Amino acid sequence: MDSGPPFHREGLPTTISKAEKQRWRSSSSSSKSSSSRPSILLAFFSCLAWLYIAGRLWQDAENRTLLANLLIKNSSQRPKILTVEDKLMVLGCKDLERRIVETEMEITLAKSQGFLSNQLKSSSNKKFLAVIGIYTGFGNKLRRNAFRGSWMPEGDSLKKLEERGIVIRFIIGRSPNRGDSLDRNIDEENHTTKDFLILDAHEEAEEESPKKAKLFFSTAVQNWDAEFYVKVDNNINLDLEGLIELLESRQGQDSLYIGCMKSGEVVSEEGKQWYEPDWWKFGDAKSYFRHAGGSLYILSRNFAQYININSASLKTYAHEDTSVGSWMMGIQATYIDDTRVCCGTSRQDKVCSLA
């Protein structure tokens, strides 16, 4: 028999030896194992990529949520678009709120010093014809004593004059160095004579006279209920009875602004006497409006009340008389130009005869 390798014939079964089968199995298993390794690695890296992408997506979602919350919170705090009227209203409310707080603080301070409670009692007990305020300063004690010995009553005579309805007080502020010898001397003098109205909120200085006028009328109308309030300079030799007669003739009349009416040039050159820093507000002609001269002028009760209510917003100029005149221009004032209060000059004093 032929012992050679078997021949493969078409359509006939072929016999394979056991050794060949083992070789074929080993080769197929090795090929399978070699082909499965890249698949495992690919699956592993695919898992890593999926985890990375999922982490990024989760982090982005958290960031978006955080940003959305911040936007919602900030949107409620962002300022809304305001019209011009809204802005003016807001500014006005803030200014009014500031003024209310300042006023409340001043009232609290005044009450703590016993000022309001003591002074307002007198205004509710009696009505007066007039309150006459004489401007004075720290260095004017000799002049005050001269007034007390001439036309101004003192002691019991001053009290009797108040019974007639006339209150007279020297008007003075406080020293820039509060509580110093100047203040103490005025307090001691007032303790003896009791003829001062001390403006605690005012700092006494010549350039502050317009502010002194505001405080004088405001304080006087709070302390005494009078028909008229009179400002007098400290160099006036006054005919007191003539002034009382003038005031009695005007009793019952309201909205009066009485004085020696004048006008005049506005001094625009700095360094000159009567220089007005706000000169440019008086037009090209640089002329003051009509106003009462500062030596002596009279306001009726409603004007003193007007100054008291609006003192925080009233504009002051360089001089007291023009400042008061500017306040009268904005209201329905009856101007009385009375030559009897146009004080002439006699030596160092101005004489107001009021004859």
Image: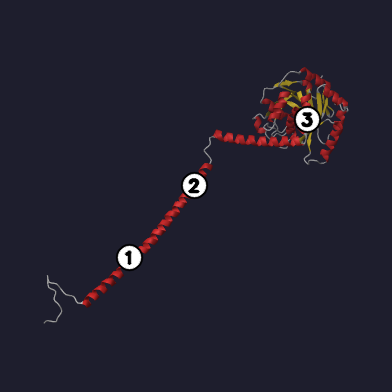
The residue positioned 65% from the left and 33% from the top of the image is 280
Q: Secondary structure at mark 2?
A: helix
Circle 1: is it few (<14), some (14-19), or many (20+) Cα within 10 Å?
Answer: few
Q: Amino acid at mark 2?
A: Asn
Say if residue 183 shows up in the picture. Answer: yes
Q: Where does residue 115 sit, x and y in percent of width and height?
A: 77, 33
Could you say which disc has been placed on residue 97 in the image?
A: none
Which residue is denoted by mark 1 in the rendering?
39
Instruction: Indicate the quadrant containing the C terminus: top left, top right, bottom left or bottom right.
Output: top right
Q: Is residue 226 above or below residue 276?
A: above
How far separated are the C-alphas under marks 3 and 1?
104 Å
Q: Is residue 253 above or below residue 272?
A: above
Q: Amino acid at mark 1?
A: Ser
Q: Secondary structure at mark 1?
A: helix
Tell me which label, 3 or 1, sits earlier in the chain: 1
Q: Quadrant of residue 217?
A: top right
Which residue is denoted by mark 2 in the rendering?
69
Q: Secondary structure at mark 3?
A: helix
Q: Are marks 2 and 3 in contact (CB under 8 Å)?
A: no
Q: Nearer the viewer, residue 36 or 61?
A: 36
Q: Where does residue 94 sit, x and y in percent of width and height?
A: 62, 36
Say if residue 231 shows up in the picture. Answer: no
The residue positioned 74% from the left and 28% from the top of the image is 222
Q: Nearer the viewer, residue 228 or 46?
A: 46
65 to the left or right of 250: left
Q: Where does residue 338 sit, x and y in percent of width and height?
A: 76, 20
Q: For marks 1 and 2, give the one nearer the viewer.
A: 1
The residue positioned 51% from the left and 43% from the top of the image is 75
Which residue is denoted by mark 3 in the rendering?
119
How far separated are the C-alphas under marks 2 and 3?
61 Å
Tell me which label, 1 or 2, sits earlier in the chain: 1
Q: Amino acid at mark 3?
A: Gln
